[in-house]
Amino acid sequence: MIASLMALSLLQSGCGRKAWPRAAQSNNQMTVLELKTYRQGEEGIIEGVLMGLEEGKGAGQDFSGFRIYHTAFPLSAEPCEGCPIQYTDVSDQRAKLDEAGRFLIELGGLKKGEVHFFELRVLGADGSLGPSSTRVKLIRASNK
């Protein structure tokens, strides 16, 4: 009986797992600042500034685009400010930067009568993701 308890304790302590697995840490520190949305005709526009580009590289050489998280709600069911929401559409999109790191992304296919929410993460040239931006919204009224 004692021998079986000792064998059992040796087997349990030898599994090799020392900590819970974690996602690899990204060294991509490029972030989106001054994020805003507006309408231009039938299109939605996201505009902002990219910060954290490496010094000495050309504008955007270590940058490949943005991962855009999007979801929409009917105007009558808009969630409260700061309430958690689940993004239903995720896409990667390229964007050009000016010398100051400013960018502009055109958004097509936004339905009327909905409020649209967006968050962006910067995609590095190596595919790494930067931290999430602030959440912004764009209201597409049904009568406009």
Image (cartoon, rainbow, N blue to C red):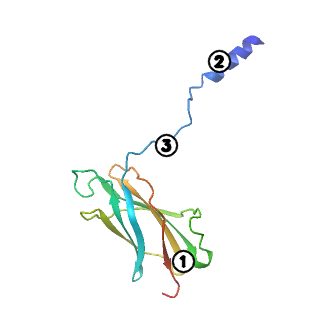
**Measured from the top left, where is residue 75 in percent x and y?**
58, 78
Quick check: 120 left or right of 95?
Answer: right
- In the image, residue 9 above or below residue 118: above
> Disc 2 and disc 1: Cα gap in Å?
60 Å
Outermost residue on the bottom side: it is 143
Label for residue 114? 1
The residue closer to the viewer here, 102 or 18, is 102
**Measured from the top left, where is residue 26 in percent x and y?**
41, 45
Amino acid type at mark 3: Ala
Amino acid type at mark 1: Glu
Which badge, 3 or 2, is on the more N-terminal residue?
A: 2
Q: Secondary structure at mark 1?
A: strand
Which badge, 3 or 1, is on the more N-terminal residue?
A: 3
**Measured from the top left, where is residue 128 in percent x and y?**
39, 49
**Measured from the top left, where is residue 43 in percent x and y?**
40, 78
Q: Quadrant of the N terminus?
A: top right
Q: Around disc 2, counting alpha carbons within 10 Å, would you say few (fewer than 14), some (14 to 19), or many (20 or more)?
A: few
Q: Secondary structure at mark 2?
A: helix
Which badge, 2 or 1, is on the more N-terminal residue?
A: 2
The residue singled out by tag 2 in the image is 10
Quick check: 29 left or right of 72?
Answer: left
The residue closer to the viewer here, 134 or 87, is 134
Amino acid type at mark 2: Leu
Q: Residue at x 40, y 66 (%)?
A: 35
Q: Secondary structure at mark 3?
A: loop
The residue closer to the viewer here, 37 or 61, is 37
Label for residue 96? none
The residue singled out by tag 3 in the image is 23
> Disc 3 and disc 2: Cα gap in Å?
30 Å
